[in-house]
Image (tube, helix red, strand yellow):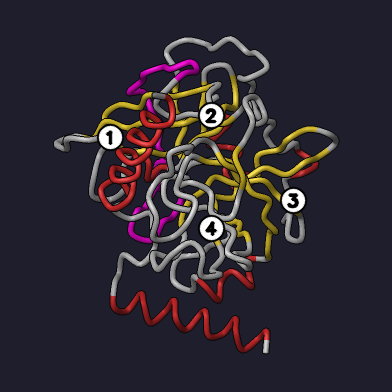
Amino acid sequence: MQVLAVLLVGLLSVAYADVDPLSNTAYGYLTRFGIPEAERIRKAEDAALASRIVGGVPAAPGQYPYQAGLISDIIGINGNGVCGGSLISANRVLTAAHCWFDGQNQAWRFTVVLGSVYLFHGGTRVQTSSVQVHPSWFPLLVRNDIAVIYLPQAVQFSANIAPVSLPSNAELQESFAGDQAIASGFGITADGTGISNNQFLSHVRLNIISNSVCQLAFPLVLSDSNICTSGLGGTSTCRGDSGGPLVVERNNRPVLVGVTSFGIALGCQIGFPAAFVRVTSYMDFINENL
């Protein structure tokens, strides 16, 4: 029964792709998801202070000091997009390439938010237009969906702002399949809902699955340079979480193994896996831009 269910999921993914070539959530992300979610988050935060994670819980201040929120200004569009990122040094943030250019829309500036569980309020806020997208980023098939943001000045580390560890040489060959990981982000918390009045950074524990299993859900776009988490039980990343971290614990340190990349456009709670950029596949690109 389990095998049959997985096969049906794969067939559904293929059928949906035949109807809609944009069935993954990365292509056209900024106008399809990023801008609407940014506006909802802004309004909800304003009300509370007067994609996020589905199936997760709110994060405490300083719980994920490496988490970055990204507010994008987009060429020719009135409104902001929303994404996440990971602080990897005092002046570098790692994110998804589609947060900067999604195949249809081009951002021209990020406001990088650090040290806050809110996206539009508090924390350290730095604006930059210096972004290095992977030179082989191919939006339609979501290949090489990774980018490094250059901050104009180094940020001060504190209990609420600190970099995440990158994989060590000993960890470069690990698949991480079977590990539990933490995803965090500012995106929506349930399909078919907006942002709640107490919306802020959320996190969820997810099981990393093998690429051979994930391939059944995303037969057209998944590659070896992706890493996936199970969506069973209705827990996953969702709209607004793009570019954010997937982290495992190694020797009492958080290690960044994934960058939130794409899911199925049918929804975040239907049991499909979520796909991330596999950080170990891009260490050369990351080190060249540190």
- The x and y percentages for residue 160 are 62, 20
Report the Cα–Cα distance between label 3 and label 2.
Answer: 33 Å
Instruction: Give, as a single range, the part of the protein colored magenta.
Output: 122-144
Amino acid, disc 3: Gln
Residue holding disc 2 = 117
Residue projecting furthest to the front: 50
Instruction: Please name the residue that numbered disc 1 is placed on.
Output: 80
| Three-letter residue code for mark 1 | Asn
Magenta span contains residue 131? yes
- How many residues crowd mark 3 within 10 Å: few (<14), some (14–19), many (20+)? few
User: Dot 3 corresponds to which residue?
Assistant: 173
Residue farthest to the left, as pictured:
76
Q: In the picture, residue 58 is in which quadrant? A: top right
| Residue name at image x 53 percent, y 62 percent | 223
- Point out the tag, 4 or 3, that comes first from the N-terminus: 3
* x and y, in percent, of residue 111 in the image: 37, 24
Q: Amino acid at mark 4?
A: Ala
Instruction: Give the mark nearest the N terminus, 1 or 4.
Output: 1
- Tell me the SS state at disc 1: strand
Query: Which numbered disc flags the more N-terminal residue, 1 or 3?
Result: 1
Give whichever of discs 4 and 2 has the lower sequence position: 2
